[in-house]
Image: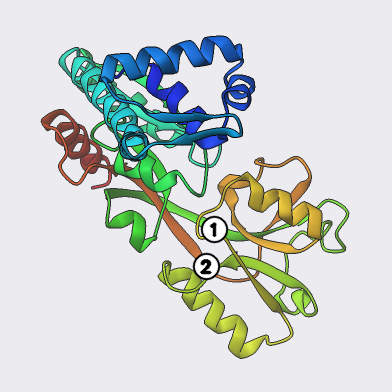
């Protein structure tokens, strides 16, 4: 929907030279210059000042680069919405799936309910677990996905979606395979004295805040290190690298081969369920109503 030369233009603007942009785009410098010349002709604007010392954005170029990313993102979003509308017309449920948010619990529901939705098909849509991008994925419910399966008591997430609770997972602890606690069958909180425990910072999860308060009050010998707001693989990699203990959940047992996940002598669990749009479609509502009958 957008002129593909905008991507070349952004690369030149960000790198500050045609040759560096060419390396980034796996093109020749001549091809990059031709695209920029064609874009300037198409827009009837001079986007760069060419100098012996290099290139510099003109005033017009600064305006275009400021809006080009929006144009590209808006175009991609529009295409995704159009594809979603096409799939909806064909009675397809789109279910997101990732390493930390696998779609398996949805499949278990589907096997029980698909006789009532025999004219529907499933489309599994993979996405990356990225702490900086997960909120965009949650916000895409109703556009990119009909459903995600998530472990969630996050206020930030639940401001962007609804959740039909399906059950609870136990809060557990993960340690590197060579850690002194790795061979224990169950961990007592006293075992953690002198250890550094990685967990998300206070404020978004009521459950984590409660657990943190208990540890700070009754087990001050446990040092707490804040992780990023939402887990991705980098958190598990840091656990292995530092040798620290990581607060995790039972469904993430097999996320990282260098980590052992161990139950703890406590009663902390976290809800998981179907995440769906704040304004679900009629078909999604039908499925949710059918799913609710299984819980009665």
Of the numbered discs 2 and 1, the one sitting upstream in the chain is 1
- What x and y, as percent, mark residue 45? 29, 25
Q: Is residue 287 above or below residue 279?
A: above
Q: CA distance from mark 2 to mark 1?
A: 6 Å
Q: Quadrant of the N terminus?
A: top left
* Marks 2 and 1 close (CB-CB < 8 Å): yes
Answer yes or no: is residue 98 visible. Answer: no
Left-right relation of 70 to 9: left
Splitting the image into 4 quarters, where does residue 194 fall? bottom right
Left-right relation of 245 to 169: right
Q: Depth check: give the residue in front, 284 or 127.
A: 127
Answer yes or no: is residue 88 visible. Answer: yes
- What x and y, as percent, mark residue 81? 23, 25
Report crowding for label 1: few under 14, some 14 to 19, many 20 or more residues within 10 A (C-alpha).
some
Label 1 SS: strand
- What x and y, as percent, mark residue 282? 11, 31
Q: Depth check: give the residue in front, 128 or 67.
A: 67
Q: Is residue 214 above or below residue 39?
A: below
Q: Depth check: give the residue in front, 44 or 87.
A: 44
Q: In percent of the image, x 25 and y 31: which residue is there?
A: 143
* Label 1 sits on residue: 170
Q: In percent of the image, x 68 and y 50: which residue is there?
A: 236
* Label 2 sits on residue: 268
Point out the residue furthest to the left here: 282
Left-right relation of 135 to 34: left
Q: Is residue 226 above or below residue 131?
A: below
Q: In percent of the image, x 60 and y 66: which residue is there?
A: 199
Q: Is residue 54 above or below residue 269?
A: above
């Amino acid at each position: 929907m957008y002129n593909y030369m905008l991507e070349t233009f952004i690369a030149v603007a960000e790198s500050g030279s045609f040759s560096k942009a060419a390396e980034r785009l796996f093109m020749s410098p001549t091809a990059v210059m031709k695209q920029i010349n064609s874009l300037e002709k198409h827009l009837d604007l001079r986007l760069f000042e060419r100098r012996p010392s290099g290139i510099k954005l003109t005033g017009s170029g600064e305006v275009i680069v400021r809006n080009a990313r929006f144009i590209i993102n808006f175009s991609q979003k529009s295409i995704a919405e159009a594809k979603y509308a096409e799939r909806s017309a064909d009675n397809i449920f789109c279910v997101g799936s990732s390493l930390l948010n696998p779609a398996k619990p949805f499949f278990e529901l589907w096997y029980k309910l698909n006789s009532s939705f025999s004219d529907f098909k499933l489309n599994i849509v993979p996405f990356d677990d990225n702490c900086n991008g997960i909120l965009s994925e949650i916000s895409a419910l109703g556009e990119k996905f009909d459903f995600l399966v998530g472990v969630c008591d996050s206020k930030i997430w639940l401001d962007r979606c609804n959740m039909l609770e399906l059950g609870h997972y136990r809060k557990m602890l993960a340690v590197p395979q060579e850690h002194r606690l790795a061979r224990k069958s169950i961990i007592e909180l006293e075992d953690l004295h002198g250890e550094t425990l990685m967990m998300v910072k206070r404020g978004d999860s009521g459950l984590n805040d409660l657990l943190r308060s208990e540890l700070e009050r009754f087990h001050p010998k446990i040092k707490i290190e804040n992780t990023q707001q939402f887990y991705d693989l980098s958190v598990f990699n840091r656990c292995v690298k530092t040798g620290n203990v990581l607060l995790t959940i039972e469904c993430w047992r097999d996320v990282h081969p260098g980590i052992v996940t161990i139950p703890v002598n406590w009663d902390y669990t976290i809800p998981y369920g179907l995440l769906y749009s704040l304004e679900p479609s009629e078909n999604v509502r039908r499925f949710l109503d059918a799913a609710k009958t299984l819980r009665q």
